[in-house]
Image (tube, rainbow, N blue to C red):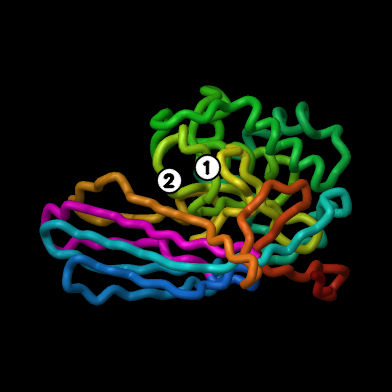
Amino acid sequence: MIRLRFSAELNYDVMSPGCDFIFNIHAAHTRYQRVLTEMMEVGQFLLPQVYTDAFSGNRYMRLRAEAGPLRLRYSATLELRHHVEMADAISEVPVAQLPTDVLVYLYPSRYCQSDRLYDVAMREFGMLPRGYARVRAICEWVRGHVQFKSATSNASTSAMDTLRDRVGVCRDFAHLMIALCRALNIPARFVTGIDYGADPALGPSDFHAYVEVFLGSRWYLFDPSGTAIPMGLMRFGSGRDAADVSFATIFGAVGAHVPKIDIEAINDPVAGAVLPWRCTEALSTDDGVGLLVGARLVPLG
């Protein structure tokens, strides 16, 4: 079991009264990610509304701020209990057998133009045996062909831009990997959170984007940027791409400061908590689902 303690502080200068915010910085509740404690501090005297999206399970907070400084600080302690599987045993799922709620992650989206990457995907990966190993090859290809460098992309950078420029940050790596997977009819989605174990040389801790790919009967973790220890990835939300899970969506004239992120892993062997380590097995922190076989839904996992 992995136990993580983290905090995320956001600071804004609200230029006019009545500016609206939607935040996605609450730790997600899944079968394998259990939130032990959490606290939200809001600098203004406001009444935020927190709700959970019925489809994605993402937790959102909305508020309307007054003019002046606005500070939010969310902190939580959580436990990760990973589903671990031997990678060689995991297969790709034919489209006809995919659960209906997975199908949306086959389609092109704003930042993941999989329809335009078909030729590249087929040339590089079309002849590889289908299964977890092929997806791992896509992940390693992206990591090997794109340079990680801060401040090299912006909110409009797409998978096509990253393929052309060969440089980006974690969200760019994620978008490119997702687009290549979808081009091969492999469902893939964008996940936001915070990572433990990143090299301090990359700079202060920040929000992190990674990928989940649907294989076998569940969503498996991949970090194409290679900056984190996958076992130390905690989840805020998941969606088709970054447009679905921005940590902050702002409506109004607002100035934003750089987020302040802290995360630590708790080493407590007596309680069964160990530090994250790099492993070769496939990892998942999402619930297993059923596959469609004929007209029946067969539960797996």
Query: Which residue is at 66% across, 52% downward?
Result: 221
Query: Which residue is at 86% across, 32% downward?
Result: 127
Query: Which residue is at 77% across, 27% downward?
Result: 123
Examine the rendered structure and indicate whether residue 249 appears above or below residue 222: below
Query: Which residue is at 33% across, 70% downward?
Result: 40
In front of the other: 67 or 94? 67
Main SS of the magenta segment?
strand
Tell me if mark 2 has few (under 14), some (14-19) or many (20+) residues whose alpha carbon lies within 10 angstroms of its own. some
Amino acid at circle 2: Ser
Looking at marks 1 and 2 on the same chain, the residue that comes earlier in the sequence is marked by 1
Q: Which residue is mark 2?
A: 205
Residue 163 in the image, given as x and y percentages of width and height: 58, 27
Decide if residue 5 is on the left or right side of residue 276. left
Q: Tell whether label 2 touches label 1 (CB within 8 Å).
A: yes
Examine the rendered structure and indicate whether residue 73 appears above or below residue 172: below
Residue 52 in the image, given as x and y percentages of width and height: 47, 73
Residue 58 appears in the picture as rendered: no
Q: Which quadrant is the C terminus positioned in?
A: bottom right
Q: Which mark is residue 198?
A: 1
Decide if residue 60 is on the left or right side of residue 182. left
In front of the other: 131 or 206? 206
* Displayed quadrant of residue 67: bottom left
Decide if residue 166 is on the left or right side of residue 260. right
Residue 77 appears in the picture as rendered: yes
Q: Which residues are magenta?
A: 1-28
Mark 1 to mark 2: distance in Å?
8 Å
Residue 166 in the image, given as x and y percentages of width and height: 55, 24
Q: Residue furthest front?
A: 270
In reply to whether residue 27 is colored magenta, the answer given is yes
**Kind of element beneath mark 2:** loop
* Displayed quadrant of residue 114: top right
Examine the rendered structure and indicate whether residue 166 appears above or below residue 41: above
